[in-house]
Image: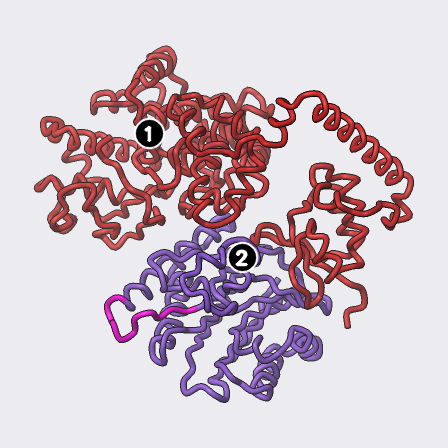
Chain colours: A red, B purple
């Protein structure tokens, strides 16, 4: 038998804390490092949700009073799980917390009494209002869909926020309901005021099949941590001195067109998890003070978000404004981020060549920046082929062919996989070597997920559909 | 920190063949346990495909940074799932084959576990045994509200029936969890041939007595499961985190 009882805490079947003693558990609860929706397990025991009073009592009765007192003390939002307690006199208060607990318990009682009095008054005085409180209509998908369809994204966020507990409850009832609500929960989590996560929804379900090239966790919370840890490295990257392996560095180099071409089932806005990551990374960067050195990175993210969004919009004015505001000769920033934006904004081979000039010519000595130049060229090739613009081909043909022969179809730094694009332009017979041509591929819908060179198709999720027509 | 591993797989006392598969590599800090389902031959093939597929993915990869482990595991399992699923489609005599999977991977100061099915991974630390994985069976899924019992096509389906397995569907959902590794921890991955025969407290007691010698501990667990009836194939993989 173990000498002193230890417990392991599990969050969303993904991460563990511990093993910890009961005291350490209380400490974690106080610091809110552990929540009431986390699960706990003792030696050879079952997993029990901390807010499941009955099971806690059955399997870990020694923790009941401790968790209950912590719930009242620090987790007011979760008190509901224990609100049917017959009396709180039986709560065993730990000695060192005695004074605090008494005050908190009294405050909790006082607060509940006031709420009860207000509700009673409303019920007695206004039948109309009470019906709104008690019998408010169940959340309807159509209502939220209509808001999004009409572009009322801010109103959507407010409406979701108001109904969130009920929506989460509905979504968690079964897989079918979850599938129905998931696109709206994702929109709420990643759009507007979203923080990239929702309490009560497993983060991996919110994320979906994790695209290999994206971070597993794209919450604003994680990005804040990443940006803070990045510190001066951001400036070094901007100067073209290094390419860090960190997610923030690779995200800044992401190709917005690559992201925009990939739609993912179950997403509305953002278009997919990559897009969501860009939005939360931007939101995180704007929420903290990391000094003026971070401004080029922020600008880069603004451009990326706009470009991803703009590709599917009939209104191209955003792209036009961006081009005017950023790419004018006097407005070019001599940073790697500025160069990448220049490459992203180029719409013709001539515009692409501008990126080789001042102030970026020195940066183009980097192998990676040259590679990124060619990925941009590939983008123009896809665009030319989609539009049936064969006149553009001679300009792109030789350089592109020299670049792709014998190499993987994935970006060496971001790992975004361009296999689909390569196959698409490969259908233009004579442009690519015969060995690279994919037999009987005639349209994007018939593209094979396998790579003709044996390169790993790392875009992973088979439900990512590449839309090369845009 | 260094990882020591040992493991055994055995046909048990009732079955005519061993549909479990096992692979581990101390140097790479990787171990896989798979328990095949779907007929006598099919289960064997499925668990072999799973173990070999994961082995190839890991041994054929470059250094995996810690933030890439979960996506890498997901991609590796996706590939393996596609292979097993395709095998079932192309060979009708093996239709319905599939496999459970426990994949444990030590990377940096973390331990990653990819889990599908009802094989299990436990943590044994300071004399305590904790089951880290959730059995993907009907009983657990109904209890957690992930499946409505009424929505099951066959109302007579047993609670222990599997909800997820590698190779049964074109897509395979898996759990990937991570836990901080510490010296002295012992991780136990096993097929249900062990856990259906021995209770957690029995396993904990045997580990407590023999965790200093992993090979011996794994053999003792195996022998105990066989002594208790050995109704299924038995596979045990033990991995201990050492301070140096």
| Residue topped by disc 1 | A364
Q: Is residue A242 visible?
A: no
| Residue topped by disc 2 | B107
Quarter that holds the C terminus of chain B = bottom right
- Is B53 left or right of B155, judged from the image as shown? left
Callout 2: helix, strand or loop? Answer: strand
Give the distance between the C-alpha atoms of the residues marked 1 and 2, in whole angstroms: 36 Å
Question: In the image, which disc is placed on residue A219?
Answer: none
* Quarter assignment of residue B61: bottom left
Q: Is residue B110 above or below residue B91?
A: above
Q: Chain of mark 1?
A: A
Given residues B156 and A144, the one toward you in this image is B156
Which residues lie in the magenta part?
B89-99
- Is A153 left or right of A61, judged from the image as shown? left
Whether residue B173 appears in magenta in the rendering, the answer is no
Q: Is residue B170 visible?
A: yes
Please give the name of the residue rendered at 33% of the width and 16% of the height, measured from the top-left corner: A323
- Is A14 left or right of A23, judged from the image as shown? left
């Amino acid at each position: 038998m173990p000498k002193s009882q230890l417990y392991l805490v599990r969050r969303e079947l993904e991460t563990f804390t511990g093993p910890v003693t009961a005291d350490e558990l209380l400490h974690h609860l106080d610091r809110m490092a552990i929540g009431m929706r986390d699960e706990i397990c003792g030696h050879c025991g079952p997993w029990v949700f901390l807010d499941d009073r009955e099971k806690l009592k059955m399997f870990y009765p020694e923790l009941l009073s401790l968790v209950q007192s912590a719930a009242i003390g620090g987790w007011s939002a979760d008190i509901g799980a224990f609100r049917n307690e017959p009396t709180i006199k039986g709560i065993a208060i730990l000695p060192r917390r005695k004074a605090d607990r008494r005050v908190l318990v009294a405050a909790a009682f006082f607060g509940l009494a006031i709420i009860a009095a207000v509700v009673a008054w409303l019920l007695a005085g206004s039948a109309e209002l009470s019906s709104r409180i008690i019998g408010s209509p169940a959340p309807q998908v159509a209502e939220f869909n209509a808001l999004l369809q009409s572009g009322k994204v801010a109103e959507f966020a407010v409406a979701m926020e108001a109904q969130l507990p009920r929506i989460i409850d509905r979504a968690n009832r079964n897989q079918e309901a979850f599938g129905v609500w998931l696109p709206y929960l994702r929109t709420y989590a990643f759009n507007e005021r979203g923080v990239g996560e929702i309490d009560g929804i497993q983060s991996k379900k919110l994320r979906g099949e994790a695209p290999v090239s994206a971070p597993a966790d794209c919450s604003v919370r994680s990005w804040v941590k990443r940006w803070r840890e990045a510190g001066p490295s951001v400036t070094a990257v901007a100067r073209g001195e290094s390419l860090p392996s960190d997610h923030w560095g690779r995200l800044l180099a992401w190709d917005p067109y690559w992201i925009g071409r990939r739609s993912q089932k179950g997403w509305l806005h953002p278009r997919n998890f990559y897009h969501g990551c860009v939005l939360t990374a931007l939101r995180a960067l704007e929420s903290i003070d990391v000094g003026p050195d971070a401004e080029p990175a922020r600008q880069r993210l603004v451009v990326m978000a706009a470009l991803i969004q703009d590709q599917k919009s009939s209104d191209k004015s955003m792209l036009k404004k961006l081009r005017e505001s950023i790419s004018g000769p006097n407005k070019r920033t001599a940073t790697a981020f500025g160069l990448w934006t220049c490459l992203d904004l180029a719409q013709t081979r001539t515009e692409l060549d501008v990126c080789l000039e001042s102030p970026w010519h020195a940066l183009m000595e980097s192998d990676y920046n040259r590679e990124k130049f060619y990925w941009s060229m590939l983008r123009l090739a896809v665009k030319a082929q989609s539009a049936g613009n064969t006149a553009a081909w001679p300009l792109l043909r030789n350089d592109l062919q020299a670049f792709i022969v014998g190499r993987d179809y994935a970006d060496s730094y971001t790992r975004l996989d361009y296999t689909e694009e390569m196959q698409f332009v490969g259908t233009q017979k004579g442009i690519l070597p015969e060995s690279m041509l994919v037999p009987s591929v005639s349209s994007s819908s018939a593209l094979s997920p396998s790579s003709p060179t044996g390169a790993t198709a790392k875009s992973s999720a088979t439900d990512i559909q590449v839309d090369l027509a845009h | 920190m260094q990882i020591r591993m040992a493991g055994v797989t055995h046909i048990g006392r009732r079955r005519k063949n061993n549909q479990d598969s096992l692979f581990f590599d101390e140097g790479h800090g990787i171990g896989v346990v798979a328990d095949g389902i779907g007929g006598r031959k099919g289960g064997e093939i499925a668990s072999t495909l799973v173990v070999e597929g994961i082995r190839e993915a890991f041994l054929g990869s470059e250094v995996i940074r810690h933030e890439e482990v979960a996506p890498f595991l997901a991609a590796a399992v996706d590939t393996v799932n596609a292979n097993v699923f395709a095998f079932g489609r192309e060979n009708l005599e093996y239709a319905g084959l599939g496999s459970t999977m426990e994949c444990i991977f030590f990377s940096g100061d973390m331990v990653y576990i990819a889990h599908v099915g009802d094989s299990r991974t436990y943590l044994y630390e300071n004399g305590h045994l904790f089951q880290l994985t959730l059995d993907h069976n009907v009983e657990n899924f109904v209890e957690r509200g992930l499946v409505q019992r009424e929505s099951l096509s066959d109302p007579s389906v047993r609670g222990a029936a599997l909800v997820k397995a590698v190779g049964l569907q074109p897509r395979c959902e898996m759990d990937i969890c991570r836990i901080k590794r510490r010296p002295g921890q012992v991780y136990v991955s096993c097929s249900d041939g062990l856990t259906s025969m021995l209770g957690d407290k029995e396993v904990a007691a045997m580990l407590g007595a023999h965790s200093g010698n992993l090979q011996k501990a794994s053999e003792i667990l195996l022998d105990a499961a066989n002594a208790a009836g050995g109704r299924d194939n038995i596979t045990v993989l033990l991995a201990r985190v050492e301070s140096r």
